[in-house]
Amino acid sequence: TKNQRKRKWFILFGNPAIYFLMGTTNAGTKEPLALLKEALQGGITHFQLREKGHGALTGEALVEFAANCQKLCSEYGVPMFINDDVELACAIEADGIHIGQDDMGCGEVRKRIGASMALGVSVHSVKEANEALACGATYLGMGPVFGTRTKSDAKPPAGVAEIIKVKTQYPNVPVIGIGGIEPGNAEMVWRAGVSGIAVISSIAQAEDVAGQIERFKQSIPGRRVG
Ligand code: TZP
Ligand code: MG
């Protein structure tokens, strides 16, 4: 039921999340689905399909790729989110959608996806967090914490100060840190109170994907509920 789906969320964010984002353009020389499979085998807890940039799939090819990703994720019991594309999220009945401040307003998105689909919103301040939560965000993404070369229109690195402010205001809202996160700096983000970390390049470009995910897990030990 819808309620069961919703409840599953809060349990899923109870452990340190290793939230992997990827699109076909992040896979380098690897076959994208093979890369996703390596990441799933390595123990990622969440996956977001973020299909952007030069050569990104569109139309039918994108729907087909998304459906293949979803099938793989469901084999590993890993929830899948769609970046930006409400139509696609609804078409494949994704577990969630993730939007930024420049996308469709989150109230409008919440209306379109209904109550049961998770809604992640990227925010950069307590003010943006207030707005996102008022219109039905399930969790918040915050970053870039560190410098990143993956997002062309990324804001300057923000560190963890705003994450701490948002978590102080909303201790029970899951926040995921993103941007330039590597095994060597993940603990600092974890200590700011996040439910987990979101990563593109440090996993997508790793030679040993499973080994890299294990390094992330070692770098953020412990459990926190909420
Ligand atoms: N939003 C803020 S930074 C970023 C996104 C999508 C890119 C993160 O990629 P990487 O390679 O983990 O720095
Ligand atoms: Mg966006």
Image: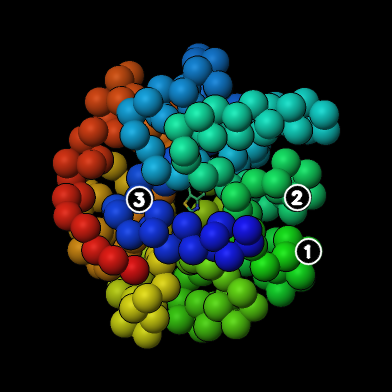
Q: Are marks 1 and 2 in contact (CB under 8 Å)?
A: yes
The residue that label 1 is drawn on is: 112
- Who's the residue at 52% across and 54% down the image? 154
- Quadrant including the C terminus: bottom left
Which of the marked residues, 3 or 2, is nearer the chain's N terminus? 3
- Who's the residue at 64% across and 78% down the image? 135
Residue 193 in the image, given as x and y percentages of width and height: 27, 68
Residue 52 in the image, given as x and y percentages of width and height: 65, 39
- Who's the residue at 21% across and 35% down the image? 215
**Up-down: is 170 above or below 20?**
below
Q: Name which residue type carries label 1.
A: Arg
Task: Examine the image and state in which quarter residue 165 appears.
Answer: bottom left
User: Residue 14 versus residue 184: which sits nearer the camera?
Assistant: 14
Q: Name which residue type carries label 3.
A: Ala
The residue that label 3 is drawn on is: 17
Residue neighbourhood size for the residue with mark 3, other residues' Cα within 10 Å, grouped as few (<14), some (14–19), many (≥20)? many
The residue that label 2 is drawn on is: 90
Mark 1 C-beta closer than 8 Å to ligand 2: no
